[in-house]
Amino acid sequence: MTLKDLYLGVDVGGTFTDLVFFDGDGVLHSYKVPSTPDRPGMSTLQGIREIAGLHGLTASDLARLHHTHGSTIAINTLIERRGAATALITTDGYRDLYELGRLALPEPMRYDSRRATPLTPRRLVREVGGRLDAEGCEMEPLDENSVVAALHELRDAGAQSLVVCLMHSYRNPAHERRVAELAALHVPDLPCDLSCETWPQAREYERAILTTINAYVRPNVVGYLDHLVSGTRELGLAAEPRVIRSNGGMQRASTIRRNPVTSLLSGPAAGVSAAAAVARAAGMEGADLVTVDVGGTSVDVGIVRAGQPLLSAEEHISDFPVLTPCIAVSSVGAGGGSMIWLDELGALKVGPRSVGADPGPACYGRGTTPALTDAFLLAGWLADGQLLAGRIPLHLEAARKAMAPVAEGLGLSVESAADAAIALAIAVMAAETSGVLAQRGVDAPEFSLVAYGGAGPLIGALLAEAVYIDRMILPQAPGVLSALGAVSADLEIDLIRPVYSRLSAIQDRDLQVIMQDMETEADACFREESQELPIIGREIIYAADMRYEGQGFDVSVALDSRWLAQGDLAAVAGAFHEAHRRTYGYAKELNPIWLKEVRAHIVGTTPKPVGAEVAPGTGAKSFGTRRVRISGVTYDARLYRRGDLGAGDTFEGPAIIEQQDTTVLVPPGWVTRQTQSGVLVLERPGVATTTMGGIA
């Protein structure tokens, strides 16, 4: 690989599709094109055509273009309930598995709280005979006649895909695999997903849900990938597309088809990973960050601890538990396209409904419903006639006309109504961010905020003030950071092996066998994924889920590979006691320990584009001023162009910084400095800069 290789990263959002392109000289170019929700993949292909035309890319150039994609196809399919008609085969007595769940209400303090409607209706669930015990030993042989009958009934009932989740199959997959063999024989056109292969972990309900989501979203994800693969090949791209996973890594499109559930948080995960990479590039090794992605539809909040995105072993996504590791991201519907409206009592609301990409906010000139972007324009944060994303002209009068009914209902001027909408949106974002920080045990003032997405840099500093953070970091291309995360992603795969035993009952050899088994699967992954794009480094990170006997919750314990290779159970026990002490403040060394699962996080380092550094500055030069309102106060803000700022250039707010993919608002009291790496750092006076880790 050489620096002459070309790289493309894509993030398909609900409103815009973001693209970043690194040319042969390492120069970063960013673009936005309107998304096409009804025709997934079309916006990506249109963006590639535009980039090829603008840069004069030849057939030879396109043939050596590496491209990685983040997408919302899987998560949107789940949220909108437009997946395949998925049937379930389970063990006798468990037909109501989905309805019973964990018998927990989503919001116990609300009288109207209801559990989510299952993805699979009860009419598409069948029970079959046969039973394994908790050790995986056969208590009753599989009743193959009941399996065959169930397969024919489900096919005739209109099932489009089949999920098999039998009791204790995580310990012994034999029964589930036999059901798959019978399905291939009797209903060969019905795709079959096995819970023992999707994610072999205990808890039948969660395992069944995960496997169901996998089958439910697959047709839409595969259809999108097929269209993407064929479309990019027609354009002359020789390399197979790579797809971002929920853990922030990537896989080949052909392998993500097997487990599309791993791409549920594809777009948000790429952004958090990129934020961590931006901090490292700016000299902030091991930084603690709060990441805030404000797009057209939603705000996604993530956490980076000690330079690494915070991974969660279980997230709730669209009302359902998802066991596969993913970057922990929390979302709230308050993006730039969020509607501004009045409820039946006349109270002001912002979101969660969005005007979407078409017609978009009223200031786009096509719609009549006011959105948060209209409020930004009315506040002067954006300018009349300004080209949003370099292509959509903004119309001040259209925004004013759309906001007028809301203002009249509130008894305010149009400008005051816009200020109120912005304040409400920031309050909603601050509440969500504070909740995430509290849940993760984060002391906000000790963290830096990374704002990105199309609207993130506009509200980032005000949001930081609301949650008591005094430093904000703006990447070189914040409006397309998730796409940048895609282009710089590594291969990352997660594996799990069930143990479910007291530590005292485990033999030294047992740990060695688990490690060898995982390494064998990791080797196969590396061989498969390294086609077309070489893996230049590899690492396997081990961990275990452990608990004291009788305890209700697990503790994640980092494992040294040498402990597994040597079967060092004493070292494993010591690590658990220490991890428990850090988590709960105490340890009970004499209590029996249970080891539930061993996990492996596989990382394959891939070649990365090398970006160009920013030239030394000669002093920030404003090209004008604009009247803006911030928190109801009017200011004359100086105007700057991001591309004109050099390394070391410093200025104070109030100011507006314009760039192709976004606009930055610098409120009064904030100082902005451009770094050599192209990162902008905003700080409030009184914050010690010695903690910046040597940002240049």
Image (cartoon, rainbow, N blue to C red):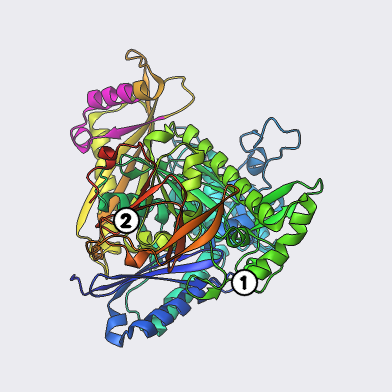
Q: Amino acid at mark 2?
A: Val
Does dot 2 land on a helix, a strand or a loop? loop
Residue 432 pos. (x, y %): 55, 41
Does dot 1 land on a helix, a strand or a loop? loop
Mark 1 lies on residue: 395
Circles 2 and 1: CB atoms closer than 8 Å: no
- For the residue pair 58 and 389, the one nearer the viewer reads as 389
- For the residue pair 533 and 21, the one nearer the viewer reads as 21
Q: Is residue 249 magenta?
A: no
Q: Earlier in the sequence, mark 2 or mark 1?
A: 1
- Up/down of 389 relative to 346, above or below: below
Tag of residue 600: none
Mark 2 lies on residue: 679
Q: CA distance from mark 2 to mark 1?
A: 31 Å
Q: Is residue 571 magenta?
A: yes
Residue farthest top in this picture: 590
**Quadrant in which the N terminus is drawn:** bottom left
Residue 37 pos. (x, y %): 58, 69
> Label 1 neighbourhood size at 10 Å, few (<14), some (14-19), many (20+)?
many
Magenta highlight range: 555-579
Q: Residue at x 72, y 48 (%)?
A: 348
> Label 2 neighbourhood size at 10 Å, few (<14), some (14-19), many (20+)?
many
- Up/down of 405 relative to 471, above or below: below
Q: Residue at x 49, y 32 (%)?
A: 438
Q: Residue at x 65, y 51 (%)?
A: 421
Q: Quadrant of residue 576?
A: top left
Residue farthest right in this picture: 344
Residue 162 pos. (x, y %): 57, 57
Q: Main secondary structure of the magenta part?
A: helix
